[in-house]
Amino acid sequence: MRTGADEKEYVPALRFRWLTPYYDRIVAHTTREATFKRALITQARIEPGHRVLDLACGTGTLALWIKQSEPLAEVVGVDGDPSILLLAAQKAERAGVPLRFDHAMSHELPYPAGHFDRAVSSLFFHHLSWANKERAARELFRVLKPGASLHVADWGRASNALMRGLFLTIQALDGFANTNDNVRGRLVPLFESAGLVEVSERQMFSTIFGTMALYRAVRPN
């Protein structure tokens, strides 16, 4: 769901729709996807019976891996792009994994308050303006149960000068204004401002496009 506050601000996953069919190959070969998403799943500690939301699920890779790692969890992916959701549904069907995918925007999720035990998201927040980051974070707070946790993988503060230089490529593609929030380390205060607690940056991974960071936050009881 590479989306802002409304349809006019919607941005496809790789910015250009013609790149959507190549999304999986590009992400897999440039972001160390298997490494950071497996680490995010381990971090989330998903248990049987948990309801799990994958916000901006894209082609469904993370949702699929979560369901495969914990078959007794209820996993739902949501995204604002119908075309990428079709790819996600086809991928899940090929894998023989039952998954539900919903079409919705990050600021207006179609779920009741306090519904999910876990929420995850990968490579999404850097697409949003600060105002829309705030709206998405507040909506995640709303749909999480008290005591439930949020786990996010996205571009973070550069671990060294090389990583900072490499990240300029992402900024040129996705926009300097919104990506500056990530590279300045503003995701931690973002989640805190939404009411989440115990917010922390847990791990960092070096990639050919910069530093990938994993974050964790909790909705207080």
Image (cartoon, rainbow, N blue to C red):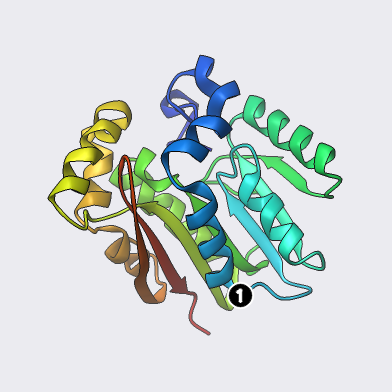
Name the outermost residue toward the bottom: 221
Q: Which residue is drawn at 38% across and 38% down?
A: 127
Q: Which residue is drawn at 30% across and 34% down?
A: 170
Q: Is residue 207 visible?
A: yes
Name the outermost residue toward the left: 161
- Residue 113 x/y as whole percent: 63, 65
- Residue 140 x/y as whole percent: 52, 60
Q: Which residue is drawn at 57% across and 70% down?
A: 42
The N terminus - image quarter: top right
From the viewer's perspective, tell me whether residue 65 is left or right of residue 44: right
Q: What residue type is labelled 1?
A: Arg
Q: Can residue 111 be seen in this view?
A: no
From the viewer's perspective, tell me whether residue 186 is left or right of residue 51: left
- Residue 168 x/y as whole percent: 21, 35
Question: Is the residue 30 above or below the residue 8 in the image?
Answer: below
The residue identified by callout 1 is 45
Query: Which image quadrant is residue 90 in?
Result: top right
Query: Which image quadrant is residue 210 in?
Result: top left
Number of marks in the image? 1
Asked which secondary structure carries label 1, the reply is loop
Q: Nearer the viewer, residue 129 or 65?
A: 65
Q: Residue at x 42, y 24 (%)?
A: 15
Query: Which image quadrant is residue 8 in?
Result: top left
Q: Which of 181 and 5 is in front in this view?
A: 181
Q: Which of 150 and 97 is in front in this view?
A: 97
Circle 1: is it few (<14), some (14-19), or many (20+) Cα within 10 Å? Answer: few
Question: Is the residue 139 above or below the residue 102 in the image?
Answer: below
